[in-house]
Image (cartoon, rainbow, N blue to C red):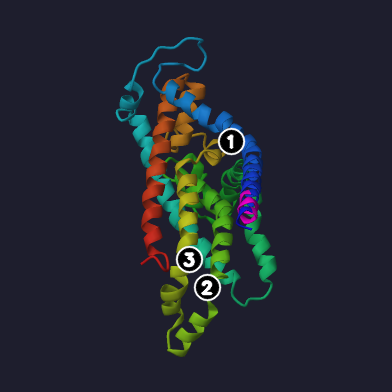
Amino acid sequence: MEVIGTTNAQTAGRRKMALGSKKLRVYVWFTLPALLLYIGFFFYPALMGLNYSLTNWDGMARTYRYIGLSNYAAIFKDERFLHALGFTFKYTLIVVVAKLAIALGLALLLTSRMRFRSFFRSIYFFPAVLSLITIGLIFNEIFFTILPVIGEALGIEPLSRNILGNKDTALYGILIANIWHGVAVPMVIFMAGLSSVPKDLHEAATIDGAGKRQRFFSITLPFLIPMLNVNLVLLIKGGLTVFDSIVAMTDGGPGTSTESIGFLIYRHGMLENKFGYATAESIFVFAMIAIISYVQMKWLNKQEVGQQ
């Protein structure tokens, strides 16, 4: 009986191992295509970009010369790059704060007991289905033709001029277009978070005499930290890599007043034949975004409910 029991156990063990091996092969075959695509279209190009950042390649010649870290050293001495960096940080700060505030306000409004909620949700989400190039061209026409006519008719001097044609106001024209376009996605993420807030906590706090403001900061906001985390990563990344709307609205002008880092990298690499230098700039921006996102996520994770 012991021999039979041992044999059955061994057979069961072999079957279990065979089943595990079969599952492993299935996992490998399902994972392999995605892994090969990732290596071919992301990992390998990233390595080649790192290689080109150490050269003086102009993007056209068949040969190039390795110059070490000279491109990286030149970045911090380049006044044009430093100006673009300052512009990008200013733009990112304003656009992140504005989008978060508006998106959260709209999410609270559209999850309240208001009439025609579905209709207003569709209206507010509509800009998200349009490309930033399209949005930029639309607002370009609004700022260039429509608003000046209205301003002249009403006798409002600041409104009668195209704000994109003034280096002091062009930034705000880009911001208006981007904020109008980019509020929808963080709004939806906040709405998903608001649906997960326990209603019984609000009811208990109401019974205890807490007002709406107290309930929001003490109950709602802590539960929205994961959504805030996601939105911050997306918005900061989008702000630091802004490109489409600048191409469509100002082309970096007037002068170089609205050149962002992404737009400057494009000009250096594609228009000024400084491909190696532009690649070094892009790697610097990648590292900067990675560090900022890591620090921000580590800090916000500590603020989550259950992590304090």
**Residue 9 is one of the magenta-drawn residues:** yes
Using the image, tell me which numbered label, if any, was put on residue 194.
Answer: none
Q: Is residue 253 visible?
A: no
Q: Residue at x 36, y 50 (%)?
A: 295
Provide the residue designation for mark 1.
35
Name the side, left or right, on which 39 lies relative to 26.
Answer: left
Mark 3: give few (<14), some (14-19) or many (20+) Cα within 10 Å: many
Q: Quadrant of residue 167?
A: top left
Percent x, y for residue 243? 52, 38
Mark 2 vs mark 1, foreground winner is: 1
CB contact under 8 Å: marks 3 and 2 = yes
Q: Quadrant of residue 36?
A: top right
> Where the N terminus falls, by quadrant?
bottom right
Location of residue 199 (image quadrant): bottom right
* Residue type marked 2: Val
Per the image, label 3 sits on a secondary structure element best described as loop
Asked if residue 157 is among those painted magenta in the image, a careful observer would answer no
Q: Amino acid at mark 1?
A: Leu
Label whose residue precedes the other's in the sequence (3 or 2): 2
The location of residue 74, given as percent across then percent down, is 32, 25
- Judge whether 117 appears above or below 130 on screen: below
Percent across and percent down for residue 29 are 66, 37
Identify which residue, 288 or 129, lies in the foreground.
288
Q: Which mark is residue 224?
A: 3
Q: What amino acid is at disc 3? A: Leu
Q: Residues within 10 Å of mark 2 (few under 14, many from 20)?
A: some
> Which residues are drawn in magenta?
4-10
Q: CA distance from mark 3 to mark 2?
A: 8 Å
Q: Using the image as rendered, state which of residue 53 and residue 248 is in the foreground.
A: 53
Q: CA distance from mark 3 to mark 1?
A: 34 Å
First along the sequence among labels 2 and 1: 1
